[in-house]
Image (spheres, rainbow, N blue to C red):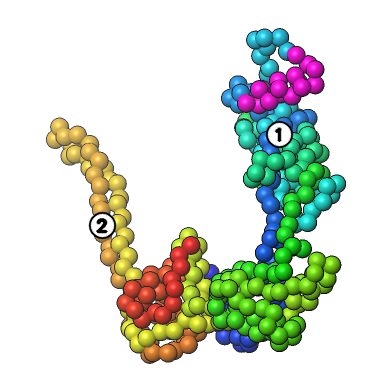
Amino acid sequence: MKKLFTSLLLTLLLLPLAASAERIKDMANIQGVRDNQLVGYGLVVGLDGSGDQTTQTPFTVQSVISMLSQMGVNLPQGTSLQLKNVAAVMVTAILPPFSKPGQTIDVTASSLGNAKSLRGGTLVMTPLKGGDGQVYAVAQGNVLVGGVGASANGTSVQVNHLSVGRVPDGATVERAVPTTLGQGDFIHLELRDSDFTTASRIVDVINAQIEPDIASALDGRVIEVRAPVAAKRVAFIAKIENLEVQPAQGIAKVTINARTGSVVMNQAVTLDTCSVAHGNLTVVIKTENAVSQPGILSKGQTAKTQNSTVDVQSDKGGLVMLPKGVSLSEVVKALNAIGATPQDLLAILQAMKASGALHAVLEVI
């Protein structure tokens, strides 16, 4: 595993880092053109005995009673419903920009109670609301679950997740979200990653290839572009989106995943002169149980004894000198030469950052 990690990391580091231009649409969004989150509460019916246990999820029973009353079915007071084929779910969806009434979108149904599985169920009509409380879509349809499970006599088998399902094209848009794309004299580009250099370069490219002095950077993220009338604005934006710009080099960063031992560094990382020592100390405690047998006619009693041995092993440490300005591939190669594992590399990099030798942002995820 260690050799595989080392080979993969060195391969990534030694690859040629040829700078390439990117399209503006890959670096920036049009202000006002965005997705909107929708959410709703509903019921999935038709389950094969795998629904909520209603004694532990009273909100499922309340929802069923409310739904039945709206359909003209009034239950007597004090009726106790023992439902097995119904599950309460939260229904979520993403409303894409420019969606119009009558279009369909996918929805996801997630169990809210203790249902064992949503497989084979049907989502009953569920209004989906936006952050403003308005209903923007209505969902209904058969729930598709990617997993499968079975149980018998206390033994169960489950593959993948059973309490979340998807309804393809399960919601119909009922209300459009107004956009400001065709209003005003300007459109605004928003960089996904704020950078003054990249913003300046985008402005230069737009002014050079579209029209002089129509673009200006408001800050390190927003670029204001003077746009034509609404009838010609779509073609204008399409032309801008496909312009290629050389993005600025990002800040030096080392990203560490402390749970998996993964370390990713970009090409901007540099080092000052430093020395790195590495060594492992292993302590092994071994205990053996024995029985002490008394002599004949000694009137003694048999007793249990424990014999423990402590063994301390220290791997041969190594000291590596890293000169200033060495390449990242040389650093990793040197650290692996003294036997540093991925977990050791995490500690070494943190110590190098604390000493001031590592010139990069150290991000732990």
Please report the residue visible at 30 percent of the width from the left and 56 percent of the height from the top. 285
Q: Is residue 250 left or right of residue 118?
A: left
| Percent x, y of residue 48 | 76, 30
Quarter residue 179 falls in: bottom right
Across and down, in percent, residue 364 comes to 45, 65
Q: Nearer the viewer, residue 318 or 92?
A: 92
| Kind of residue sitting beneath label 2 | Thr
Asked if marks 2 and 1 touch (Cβ < 8 Å), the reply is: no
Residue span colored magenta = 59-74
Q: Image quadrant of residue 13?
A: bottom right
Q: x and y percent of residue 258 in the render?
A: 45, 63
Relative depth, front residue between 15 and 76: 76
User: Where 222 falls versus 139 (above or below)?
Assistant: below
Q: Is residue 316 visible?
A: no
Q: Is residue 15 above or below residue 151?
A: below
On screen, residue 54 versus residue 122, left or right, reads left
Pointer 1 residue: 42
> Percent from the top left, x then y, of residue 81?
68, 17
Q: Which residue is mark 2?
A: 309
